[in-house]
Amino acid sequence: MKILVVGAGAVGGYFGGRLVQAGRDVTFLVRPKRARLIGERGLRIVGLGEDTTLHPRTILADEITSTFDLVLVSVKAAALRSAMDDFAPAVGPDTLILPVLNGMRHLDELAGRFGERRVLGGVVMVSTTLDADGDILRLADVQSLAYGSRAGPPPDELVGVLGGAGFETRLAADIVGEMWAKWVFIAATGAVTCLMRATIGEVASTPGGTEFAHAVVDECAAVAEAAGHPVPKESLDGTRTTVTAPHSSLTSSAYRDLVRDRPVEVEEIFGDLVRRARLLGAPVPLLSLVTLNLRVYQRSRA
């Protein structure tokens, strides 16, 4: 199976790199600057005692001359529309598209462009970032990929392709429900760290911090339940434990982008959640506050 990984950043580079290590037929669709960097120093995965250098195939958008069997989309939401233009020539009649973006809004955009049937649902759990050298830096020992069909038969043909590649994989029976559960998790951790401009532990160890974090989780979970996708108790308990750990150095990817003066996925993680909450009649004052806060930040950057 020919795999095209769209983007070679902290997420796509990590999972695509593991697939390369496992001997899969992988090509990375990248921008010229990233292609030059990978050509010069390789695709490097470092941190937690690892120092791996890979030399994968890369391709630019105007170099695509054939279709692929699987397109793994791992770009930031702000780059999705241009990415769809870039990888469109790689999509054939039987191509499956597996996006691993945050939130849910990207599903509508991809399905509107390429058709509902071919767009799968996906959830990744990984803690990585790009360091100053452009290497993929592992921050925690977590790496998993759940995927599944949102309509129609499950994509059984991917089991042997994605499995056994150095990260946990699972064909999910209710991938949309799992996407909602992850959305609740990243929105909660993002709201706590971004609004307070601090790590989880710094917030939790401050008087009132734990109560604030619980209130954020309650709002996020209420939106999921109103939308018909209540988060399972075990998953929700795990989110509560994560956002109230008093000695945790955990931050969110949104917070890391914020403190580095990078664009934040405010609309995809927070804005869309608030929009759905209002349509469903779920009050979300804290989520509304963090959305406003980050919109002001985005405007100041612009």
Image (spheres, grey):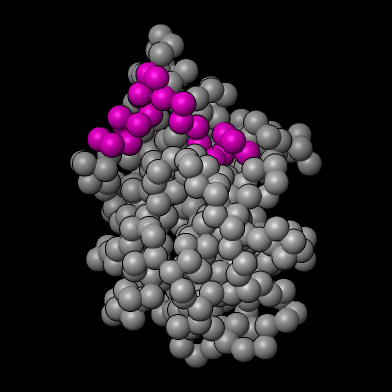
The reply to whether residue 269 is in sight is: no
Magenta region includes residue 63: no
Residue range corresponding to the magenta coloring: 237-257
In x, y percent, where is residue 203? 45, 19
Residue found farthest to the left: 233
Of residues 293 and 281, the one nearer the viewer is 293
Of residues 140 and 153, the one nearer the viewer is 140
Question: What residue sits 57% from the left and 87% below the top?
Answer: 67
Residue found farthest to the top: 207
On screen, residue 107 versus residue 180, left or right, reads right
Quadrant location of the N terminus in the rendered image: bottom left
> How many numbered discs, if any?
0
In x, y percent, where is residue 139? 49, 39
**In the image, residue 58 above or below residue 227:** below
Of residues 267 and 251, the one nearer the viewer is 251
Q: Residue 173 occupies which quadrant of the picture? A: bottom left
In x, y percent, where is residue 281? 38, 42
Of residues 267 and 169, the one nearer the viewer is 169
**In the image, residue 74 above or below residue 252:** below
Q: Residue 241 occupies which quadrant of the picture? A: top left
On screen, residue 225 versus residue 119, left or right, reads left
The reply to whether residue 63 is in sight is: yes
Question: What residue sits 50% from the left and 69% below the top?
Answer: 20
Quadrant location of the C terminus in the rendered image: top right
Magenta region includes residue 253: yes
